[in-house]
């Protein structure tokens, strides 16, 4: 090996070690943030769980009334606009000695990731920012803001629309007769698994504009390609929505409708970015 090769290897080794050291420091900050978030969420885990149970509570309260509610009544009840009077308190059951404790642990982990997401996203941005041009950093930064906003919009749709409807539909399947009574008593862990599954499914699906816009910036897709792919995208959205939502006739469309609108919005965003890029190239 020549002296030039050895000098080149030594020159590349120093930046690599500095990047690894910075990565370690970023990971330490992320781990510390998640740990703090976990402790805080575990301390308030019961309050958080009661908050998540509210859609089931409102659906149960409305289902117990003689006049059956409509879907709009469920949304108003969860939002606190109307206050239905329940004839009974809904019950959830725990079938294992430590089920409630482990449910709180899972809830604390999930809550910690959600609460500390801004910190995690900022650490990711600070790690990759030195390798980006100033123009690329300006283009990348708005997506760090749009991503959590879209996630919480998806979560709001789950909490105020999807969960009340799913719980109301499930309660409507109960059987009460002189021969047998079949009542819905969800498990504590099963209810949390349903909530987290729906929150993640809607939150991640609502990231579609971010993903497609970044792909447009990278030059992987353009507005014309996305518009021509529209019918296949609609089919894929319906299939994915059916896979990640409960098995009823309405839930998949409650997800597919907003996602398709976001897809159309993504086409508009990519088209606007292309027009802006053309204007900037014309000025050069």
Image: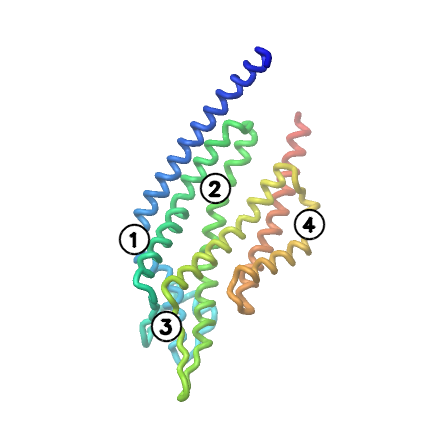
The Cα–Cα distance between marks 4 and 3, rounded to whole angstroms, is 45 Å
**Which quadrant of the rendered structure holds the N terminus?**
top right
User: Residue 259's spot in the image, x, y percent?
Assistant: 57, 55
Disc on res. 61:
3
Which residue was labeled with disc 4?
227
Residue extending furthest bottom? 178
Measured in 3D between alpha carbons, the distance from the residue under mark 4 to the one under mark 2, in whole angstroms, is: 26 Å
Query: Mark 3, residues whose alpha carbon is within 10 Å: few (<14), some, or many (≥20)?
Result: many
Residues at badges 2 and 3 in contact (C-beta under 8 Å)? Answer: no
Disc 3, SS: helix
Q: Earlier in the sequence, mark 3 or mark 1?
A: 1
217 up-or-down from 71: above or below: above
Among numbered discs 1 and 4, the one appearing first in the sequence: 1
Which element carries disc 1, helix, strand or loop?
Answer: loop
**Left or right of residue 147: residue 187:** left
Point out residue 230 in the picture as x, y percentages from the top left corner.
67, 53
């Amino acid at each position: 090996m020549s002296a030039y090769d050895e000098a080149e290897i030594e020159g590349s080794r120093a930046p690599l070690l500095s990047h690894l050291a910075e990565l370690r420091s970023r990971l330490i900050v992320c781990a510390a943030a998640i740990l703090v978030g976990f402790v805080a969420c575990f301390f308030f885990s019961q309050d958080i769980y009661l908050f998540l149970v509210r859609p089931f509570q409102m659906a149960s309260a409305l289902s117990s009334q003689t006049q059956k509610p409509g879907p709009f009544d469920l949304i108003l009840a969860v939002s606190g606009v109307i206050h239905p009077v329940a004839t009974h308190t809904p019950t959830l059951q725990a079938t294992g000695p430590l089920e409630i404790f482990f449910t709180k642990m899972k809830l604390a982990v999930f809550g910690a990731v959600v609460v500390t997401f801004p910190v995690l996203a900022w650490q990711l941005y600070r790690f990759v920012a030195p390798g980006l041009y100033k123009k690329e950093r300006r283009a990348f930064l708005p997506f760090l803001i749009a991503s959590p906003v879209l996630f919480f919009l998806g979560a709001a749709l789950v909490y105020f629309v999807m969960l009340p409807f799913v719980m109301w539909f499930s309660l409507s399947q109960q059987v009460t007769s002189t021969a047998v009574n079949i009542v819905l008593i969800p498990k504590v862990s099963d209810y949390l698994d349903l909530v987290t599954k729906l929150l993640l499914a809607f939150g991640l699906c609502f990231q579609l504009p971010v993903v497609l816009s970044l792909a447009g910036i990278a030059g992987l897709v353009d507005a014309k390609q996305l518009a021509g792919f529209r019918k296949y995208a609609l089919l894929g959205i319906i299939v994915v929505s059916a896979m990640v939502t409960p098995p009823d006739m309405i839930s998949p469309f409650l997800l597919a409708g907003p996602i398709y609108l976001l897809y159309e919005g993504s086409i508009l965003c990519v088209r606007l970015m292309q027009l802006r890029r053309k204007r900037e190239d014309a000025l050069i």
